[in-house]
Image: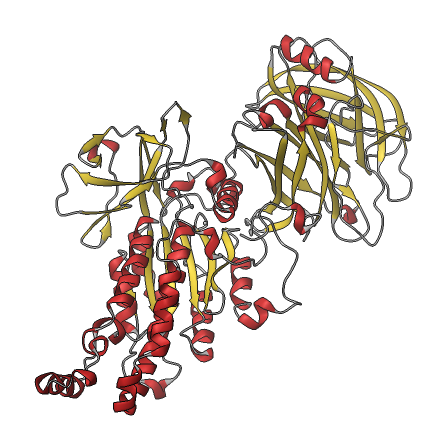
Amino acid sequence: MKSSVSLCSLLMVALLGLWTLPARAEQRFSQSTDVVVVEVPVQVLRDGKPVRGLTAGDFEVYEGRSRQPVTGFETLDLTTAPTTPEAARRVPMSARRRFVLMFDLGFSSPAQMARAREAAKSLLHGSFHPTDLVAIAAYIPAVGPKLLLGFTPDHKLVESAIDHLSPVQMFSHGYRLAADPLELAEIAASLADGDSAGYKGKRGDSDKNADANFSAGSGFTDHLNPVSSVERSDREAQAREITQFTKALGVFADTMASVHGRKYVLLLSPGFESSILTGTSDDDKVWDLGTHSVRGDVWNIDSDELYGSTKVGSQLEKMLEALRRADCVVESVDIGGIRASADDLHAARNPGADGLFTIADSTGGEYIGNFNNLAQAMEKVLDNTSVTYVLSFQPDVKRDGQYHKIRVELKDPKGARVVYRRGYYAPKPFAQETQTARMLDAATQVVSGQEGGPVGLSVLTAPFKMPGEKAYVPVLIEIDGPSLTAGNPGNALPAEVYAYAMDEKGTVADYFGRTLALDLAKVGPVVSKTGIKLFADFDLPPGSYSVRVLVRNGQTGATGLRVASLEVPAFAQGSPVLLPAFFPEPPNRWLMIRQTKTRKEEIPYPFMARDRPYVPASKPLLTPGAEAVMALTGYHLGAGPLAAQAMIMTADGKEIGAGKVKVLGHEAAAGDGPERLTTTFQPPALPPGDYELLVTVSDPQGKSETSVTPFAVPAASEVKTAARGAGR
């Protein structure tokens, strides 16, 4: 795994990977309001089973009393949904289920936590659908809520994160790995209170005074009734623990509000003593307190013990409201009810069960207790959420981050129940978003793999042989300068770059991240003409990969995402390999930045022709009828003089004609190194657009290899711009 160049260079080291605005912001700006696309995931249940076959015409959406036209409608049925990661990438992120496995390390005993970890891992083997995203979080009393792993489809990584669930492990020097900038591949950092300014239940001066009062108690009462003083002190300690827990979950809820879609939070906890909230249920204690009341012994009456703490109850309700607004459905898993052995069959009921039931019931979830198989207990939840309808509407809202209530109804319910989020948050300026929210949004885009965004970029990847089992994979990222700098305030531009290589199972095989601190007063001329070219690299074993690159303006929040397919061959087998065609660019066209990692053995610069280095274009711009220098690189291509041919295809795979290729030189392989051909390529007459170039290299014996290279034919205006950027 690869870390960023330095932790200081990353804008978001401290937080997920991995977790919404309920409204995904496809925003069109006006002076006072934004038109946003609000996406509302909906489940419809009848007799406890999901209802299938509904259409947009079956639903009505209201914001307040105003009915909203449904402008978009999509359905995800997990019984028929694609199971491959590549197919899952095409599923809308708003329709994909998100599960957060949250482990309560505060109220849980070590034995309970060990059983909870095993129960959670059982879910990873067949329960979740490949389109599901899973995150790992923990509540640690001394620290607060921690997002240990961002939302990811990589169940192997999730299991690894669960295995590391120990405060000792998480904070030991040896465990703290180099940071993955989006928390998609490594276990990560805390959700500090400062990252959740929107949560109104955070600690303030009044809370500090309240805690001081909790600790001090009443000297007069303590003197008259020392036994009551001990009991009161114990209850006050429990009240502080519950308050700390509810505040932490409130902070967690605010963080989850920045994640698109509904979140199913599996809270694995023994719960807390509910009598702190509801008052004692001990009949003898109630009788004694009543007797003191009749006698007028008010100093012997603890109203919190009799009726429950209104302060703690108020804090709990704030937390529940924060969870509801963040569209978090809590499924409370009572790990205090997981029996460790047959000897526990007659154990007393878990005193924390009522608290867990309250949290689940108040957020639309279910209380799961007294079980040994979490996967079996979760079957109902997973089945109920197997069909999701995504309704979209476009309200005009002020750009103020305020919460807006919505209502979804069926025109003809026929006894069906509609489950949906109850509101959405209006967008707010990117500068006001927390670092955690920014990181989670970037991670969501990378996981989705859905290309687009206002920032233009192109990506080139190619595998080269190096010592060992893995291949050296340069990654060249070209970032369009005008689209990156559009709307940037001032000369400071933090350009964030995140790149991940995901294998066929959705596992992160390697990554890098960097924030480029650019001073436009110095580099503005070249950036505004062309842009930035970042040279980085992966180390990858043989296999098929999806390389996902996200670029974001750290000032405005504008992003661009590109996905490149990559095949890494098993070089050790000695099979012939032809890499994509490389088209050298003239020097000084881009602002060049290189990022490489330290290796035991230095890797030779890969892009060479006639013993001279060059920098290839990430996506070549070719002019019809004009010759362009083309470099071909391969391994074990055959003996004797090599010939090359070219065929051009449209982006959708239609063959449209051949191009002219001339071989100018052939450099034979030196040892295990590559062999290279220097050629020229002349495309035929083509209209502006995107194309694919199929190059075939063959030897005299008829053995041949073919590679595919995307290229574009620019419009006349783009050709002039490129020429100016190259200094021609």
Q: Is residue 642 visible?
A: yes
Please state if 260 lies on the left or on the right of 464 as rendered.
Answer: left
Q: What colour scheme does the image use? A: secondary structure
| 97 displayed left or right of 358 | right
Residue at horizontal 12 percent and vertical 44 percent from the top: 414
Residue sticking out furthest to the front: 220
Which residue is at the front of the view, 475 or 652? 475
Side of 347 where 178 appears, left or right: right
- For the point 85% across and 34% down, the residue is 675
Judging depth in this view, the residue of 235 and 166 nearest the camera is 235
Q: Position of residue 353 (x, y in %)?
A: 28, 73
Q: Is residue 629 above or below residue 127?
A: above
Q: Is residue 375 visible?
A: no
Position of 162 relative to 725 (above/below): below
Q: Give x and y (percent) for residue 185.
A: 58, 53
Query: Residue 521's quadrant in the figure?
Result: top right
